[in-house]
Amino acid sequence: MAVTTEQIADAMYEMVKEVQGKKKLKAMDLTHAMIDRYGAEGCDKKMCKAAIRDLIDNDRCVYTYFGGSYIELPHEEGAASGG
Amino acid sequence: MSETNGKGSATPLLDELEKGDWPSFVTQIKEMAADGNEQCQQLLELLERSYREKIGHWKHGGIVGVHGYGGGVIGRYNDLPEEFPAIAHFHTLRVNMPTGWFYTSEVLRKICDIWDEHGSGLTNMHGSTGDIILLGTTTDELEPTFQALSEADFDLGGSGSDVRTPSACVGPARCEWACYDTLDLCNDLTQTFQDELHRPAFPYKFKFKCSGCPNDCVASIARSDMSIIGTWRDDIRIDQDEVRAYAEGGMNIERDICGNCPTKCMAWDGNELEIDNSNCVKCMHCINAMPKALRPGVDTGATILLGAKAPIVQGAQLSSVLIPFIKLEPPYQEIKDLAERIWDFWGEHGKNRERVGELMQRVGLGNFLEAIEVEPLPEMIAAPRDNPYVFYEEYYEEEDEEAEEEEPAAVP
Amino acid sequence: MDTQRRTDFGPPDFRRFLPPVIKDNYGKWKYHEILKPGVMVHVGEGGDKLFTVRAGSPRLLGTKRIRKYAELADKYCGGHLRFTSRHNVEFLLTDEANIDPLIKDLHDLGHPVGGIGPAISSIVHTQGWVHCHSAATDASGVVKAVMDDLHEYFDGTKQIPGKLRIALACCLNMCGAVHCSDIAILGVHRRPPKVQQGLNKVCEIPNVIAACPTAAIRPSTVDGNPSVEIDESLCMFCANCFSVCPALPMADALNDGVSIWVGGKVSNARSEPMFSKLAVPFIENEPPRWPTVVQAVRKIVEVWADGARPYERMGDFIERIGWPKFFKLTGIEFQKEHIDDYRYAGLSYKRSAQLRH
């Protein structure tokens, strides 16, 4: 099944949204999931990389770091709010 | 040095660290605080409090950064923001240094101008990985700082699960022992892997360090996932007159040079130094001791070793040999392809926060080599295994054997 | 989005900042000599000379001091300088007559000159209480106190048999990767993490549990909310859980402190690279000047300086005399904590560049 980078980005966004607050996803988790879903013929690592860049550059997702780098929905930093 | 005022100092403990002969970091912060720099003033007070309470007051921030990048900014907040509002946000920018840490006064001043305008004015020259560390600014200033840096041609370095800022020893710029161009390779890798450096896509960090000879001045064997250490495979160049000059100058060549050779491949008869180069392990000792008389050979290249790391998570490791000898010439395609194959396998199988060295241990070096398409070689080990628990992957059944014997008959 | 915004252009090319004498002799240096403490000359194949003056620095520098460095570089070096991997600053001169005036100016500014050849160079270190969230001790303060005590070994006032490299990391995350130093000072926690209320709001519990290398963290319920509990008997205080979850703080004023490790090296010269080994398991934090740490480091340095043969590094020296004698000479009490009880496989890998080609 051939898919576009935009479709991959949308599917990744939905994944991130679904687990926000419950589980943190890394770039490779998203990439693996997309290849599982669309098959290696329809969707390669390069397209996944482009889709992630698209999500970040368009402010739909942000990189976060908690002992490792993750991709999450933009949200307020816990540590920024006093106490 | 200390600037105590009449009312007694607000930082009596830190003042103690302005005494003594070594240059003081407290003096540095005070120098910057002197002209009403509130961030530095409050940093001094907060640090004084840590000294009193014996505990740090910083919290880790995990979200702040510049647009589009997942690395290069370390978020920091203090845990007493009401008392220390000027440093409630006090983030670090890691700025990729020029390879080899070379500067002109002009470019240094430019960095200072930017940081005086946008941050605390405090820096580390440099951080442990090698970046210029701009220490302390607010969230709002991150993007403008990056903008100003980029106008001065400075980009951010790595942080998080990405390629960390590669570093190199001084190399051919000022060292006769550089067995390859450490600066050019480091700069080339940095430029080639900009995407991997700024957009974290790995299980954890990945470091390249380029040392020009086995003295390893950037500690690559202890600190980098891929250690690239210069070496040679022909003969040490000898100037016998200069050897004799060292002897005449009082050097005990028999005891201190030949006696320290790890393979005892040298002999000194009082007139000539003889080296059995086939038995030399390129340790550098004799060359270090007699730089005017001995030099590395001319057939130079590097040994590539893999997997060094600090203790977190599974324990510290030194890098181990992957490629015993490789010639290193631009465009360095072989080493880049190798890195990509390693990242592919690591991305596929690595766990969160697992470094390449830990993955090598977990799957076994043999399996790891197979996955990255590198042949096993005896140079990779100190000794073959001493336990008999071999994981053979295949075995024959009775029928297979018969079928084979009856070849060319078709296997059922 | 700003269309002018540049990304991924990398650092400026280092070639822009090389002095002319380096451009002319790049890859063509013939030999070097140490002229005096902190001063060396590199001589090119064609006879060109480049003088280097190395000065110690506190690593944490304000822009005012960096501007002073720039002034000195303009005055003596045609504006050229560099830094070393151990935080030293190096001035690159072509006129030998400028060396002594430069050294005088550096001394006036409070910077010692030295750290080349058989000497103690600057201490590589981390941020500590100045800027780190996971520090078990301060970094800059301990380093300042230790170097105040040892500066004579930096500036050449006192002779030593070989190189001695000291490093400090303020927790065992080891941003400073100190584990292969002649002497390593390492901040350590000794109290298991204190589970904070509302942990499940800031951390994903499966990630927290997976972070523990000894499986000491288990799921639990606190006041009806999902949380974790710690099997304290399994905690080895690595703080990996705190790295992934800020609701598990490790820092504790009563229990934090430093340990001292000895005998590591990264160079392949003579012996292969080696890890530092535990010498002093724990010394409590004694701000502002950590006198017990300073004394312990000095004692170790003196035992080595007295007993080591020319060129012999700390690790080689200890290997030759044996650990029992090391403990006897330094007066450090050997205790249970010195004995390793954490297994790590893979010791048979070749961990050096010492090869026959």
Image (cartoon, rainbow, N blue to C red):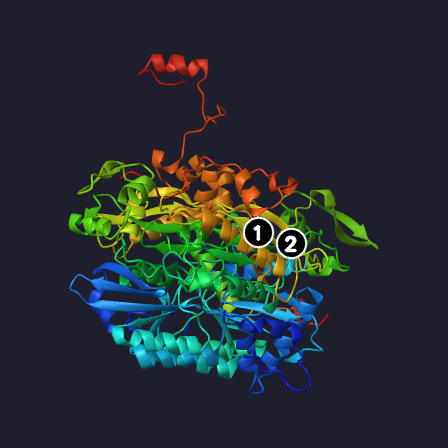
Q: Residue C214's spot in the image, x, y percent?
A: 65, 42
Mark toward the start of the polypeptide (2 vs 1): 1
Q: Toward the viewer: B28 or B400?
A: B28
Q: Which residue is mark 1?
A: C260
Task: Residue at 21%, 43% (x, y): give it.
Answer: B234
Residue B318 against residue B137 in the figure, above or below: above
Quadrant assignment for the C terminus of chain B: top left
Q: Is residue C135 visible?
A: no
Q: Secondary structure at mark 1?
A: strand
**Please, what is the three-letter code of the amino acid marked with disc 2?**
Ile
Q: Residue C90's spot in the image, x, y percent?
A: 36, 69
Q: Are marks 2 and 1 in contact (CB under 8 Å)?
A: yes
In this rendering, do the residues under marks 2 and 1 share a single chain? Answer: yes
Q: Residues within 10 Å of mark 2 (few under 14, many from 20)?
A: some
Task: Residue at 39%, 60% (x, y): give it.
Answer: B167
Q: Which residue is mark 2?
A: C283
Q: Residue B154's spot in the image, x, y percent?
A: 40, 73
